[in-house]
Amino acid sequence: MRPLHRSDPSTIAGHRLLGRLGSGGMGVVYLARTPGGGLAAVKLIRAEHAADPAFRERFRREARTAERITGRWVVRVLGADPEAREPWLATEYVPGPSLAEAVALSGPLPEPAVRAFGARLADALADLHAAGLVHRDVKPANVLLALDGPRLIDFGIARTAGATALTATDAMIGTPGFLAPEQARAAGAGEVGPPADVFALGCVLAHVLTGERPFGTGTVAAVVYRTVHEEPELDSVPASLRPLVASCLAKDPAARPTAGAVRDALGGTGGQAGELLPPGLPSLIAERSARVLDLPVPEPTALAAVEPPRGPSRRRLLVAGSAALVTGAGGLTAWLATRPTGSGPGTGAGGPTGARNLPTYAIGVQTDLSGPRKADGRAQERGARLAVEQFNARPDRPFDLALKVRDDAGDPRRAVAAAEALGADLSVVGVLGPTTRAAVTAVLPVLRRTGLVCAVLATGLDEAQLSQALMSGVYFEMRPIATTLQVAFSTAGLARGATRFAVLEDQEDDRFSWSMGNDAVTTLDGVGVTVIRRAVAGDSEDFAAAVRPLLATDPGAFLYAGLSPRRAGLCATALVQEGFEGLRGGIEPLVEREFLATAGSAAEGWYFGTSYADPDVVPAARSFAAAYRKRWGVPAGTPVERYAVEAYDTVHVIAEAVGALLKDRLEVRRGGVARRIGEGTYTGAAKKYGFDSLHHYRFIDEVFAYRIEKGVPRCLGRAEEVNKRESERLKASATP
């Protein structure tokens, strides 16, 4: 869940909004409290789409369809108004993880659990089919896990069997890998009936039993081809269930069993499904349920007046509301205001000579000190070490800090070994996490098992991986999610008066690039901007052919949505060759030597959004920069390494959480440290740190702007402030 935007309403038809569950081009889904105090998911359709008669009719159909679904294992409709200016639909909210998350977290589920959950899903489909409906998008992500069993969700493309579809003639409805051959062919609405749902159910059963998709992975075209023409891979499905799953996956719809027959073959819907789940999953479902039920109601939001953009549009960028600041006498803010500028003689990880006999808590640094990101790893270690030394120099400190450093070289296997060692050391209360995405994902099982608090600075997971990582309750990214870093570029374009944006989505990482393009649309939606999106194939390096159609639309700004510095460099070269002179840029992972080397002079002027700051440019961080240079001998005029000040801040965040536990006379345990970090808002030298109830980083405006100048990345400052100044400068220069 993400916080409400300032442009969001506070209520919808008496439902008090708590946060955003998701958004897209058509509308937003909110988490809300019903007038009776329960929880609901409320889908709100944007007025411009509701003005389309065909779209409104589709929404009416969805509301009517959803109201007909009354089975136990589906989410119930609580209310709807398809005739409102902005139509809405409210359903029950299930706070548990999806079946997709459960498999990603715990691996394949045991056969008894699959039988129990599969029977309940088949029962839900049997009820649906008895009502004359077809779901058409049964997949693990559309199955939520509650304490008493699964809930089938998302009936947005469900329809009456045999009815005429209101989608495009050749549209393929469903999700590749979980759709029937007749859906993959997009042959016509009349052919997609209840057997298509049974086929999808067979795909779901195979996936949760093996952890793999029966028709494999890869491009959409490849998966669809295998679905239509090849047999599923079922060798790893238990022999006792293989015939049933195979019958569900028959190519001929008439050869498949009914949903009711599948339910009966799986053993019916009796018994307690939760007791059959892997260890830890039922408690996770209960914990997530309790966490969401305890959500506070945000302060009322306000709708901003609609007017032409004069600069960066805060109504699309800033998170509404804030949590209480966890500071006070001796708190982080007071400490940062009065901290010494050097470590002083005789200090170290264990404190000054002759210090009081204080308890010592260790903070780990697990990072790359000898691999491809060793410069970033060294900066994190140095920033953390300076923070520990300064903390231990305080005469009023309530405890000492120690630093324990492990070099994983960015390698996943070494990362697991490092995490195991730090996790086994009970003096370690938290760790500044790995430097590469592969290392982070490798250590997640260790974090879950040991409860080790992990704060990641120098990399970020994609949204799907992040949602799984946050389920551990001990994982924090001290930075905005990577796709949202495009706000620096988007607002830069707005500040410069661009009304047409081109977005090139690099399918080398298609899920990330699509999400980044979608975030750009969400950011720019409603401010009079046209966004044109186009993809470049991941196996193609012909960027000239990819950018040419985008440039034909005469954009004022060009965003590369991808993660590859080399391919971004090829894109930069193509833009210069095609004569594009407008604003161009990307996000943090591209700010590497490989981009500069590949692009050469074409890199000049590229604009990037980053999660890290240059402390010389941020006024509140300049005293840190001076202390850092003195401690590590960095010459004046040489930039402080990236991620150093963020590591410094993160040590103080963890220390503040430990101090809060001691102040409340509580034992310092890893779970308690995680809870205190998650509950507070912290103001550090570089930026603010704070998290929502599910541990997502809250401050999407804490993004910094860099520009390539004379072949070198230069930090311009906090992106919001930089773009506001640029807008005012251009406005003043245009005034006679």
Image: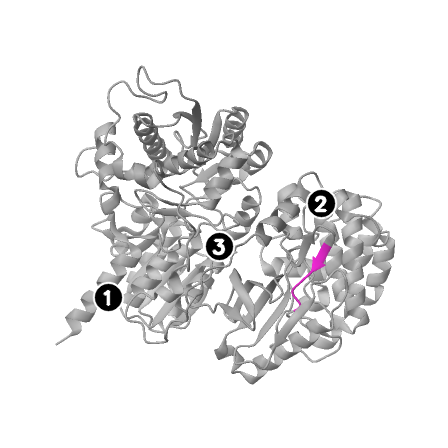
Q: Earlier in the sequence, mark 2 or mark 3?
A: 2
Please name the residue shown 84% across and 52% down the image.
Answer: 270
Residue behind mark 2: 210
Q: Is residue 404 above or below residue 141?
A: above
Image quadrant assignment for residue 157: bottom right
Q: Is residue 243 above or below residue 634?
A: below
Q: CA distance from mark 1 to mark 2?
A: 55 Å
| Quadrant of the frame with the C terminus | bottom left
Answer left or right for 116 relative to 336.
right
Crowdedness near tag 3: few (<14), some (14–19) or many (≥20) residues, C-alpha within 10 Å: many
Residue in the foreground of this view, choosing between 569 and 262 = 262
Q: Is residue 468 visible?
A: yes
Please name the residue shown 51% across and 66% down the image.
Answer: 24
Type of amino acid at the residue the image marks with label 1: Ser
Q: How is the image coloured?
A: one colour
Q: Which residues are magenta?
A: 150-155
Is disc 1 placed on a helix, strand or loop? helix
Query: In the rendering, which numbered label is found on residue 512?
Result: 3
Residue in the foreground of this view, choosing between 540 and 247 = 247
Callout 3 touching callout 1 (CB < 8 Å): no
Crowdedness near tag 1: few (<14), some (14–19) or many (≥20) residues, C-alpha within 10 Å: many
Residue 183 place in picture, x, y as percent: 69, 68
Type of amino acid at the residue the image marks with label 2: Thr
Residue in the foreground of this view, choosing between 27 and 502 = 27
Is disc 3 placed on a helix, strand or loop? helix
Residue behind mark 1: 727
- Please say whether residue 258 is one of the residues in the magenta stretch: no
Foreground label between 3 and 1: 1
Answer left or right for 278 relative to 9.
right
Q: Is residue 363 above or below residue 247?
A: above
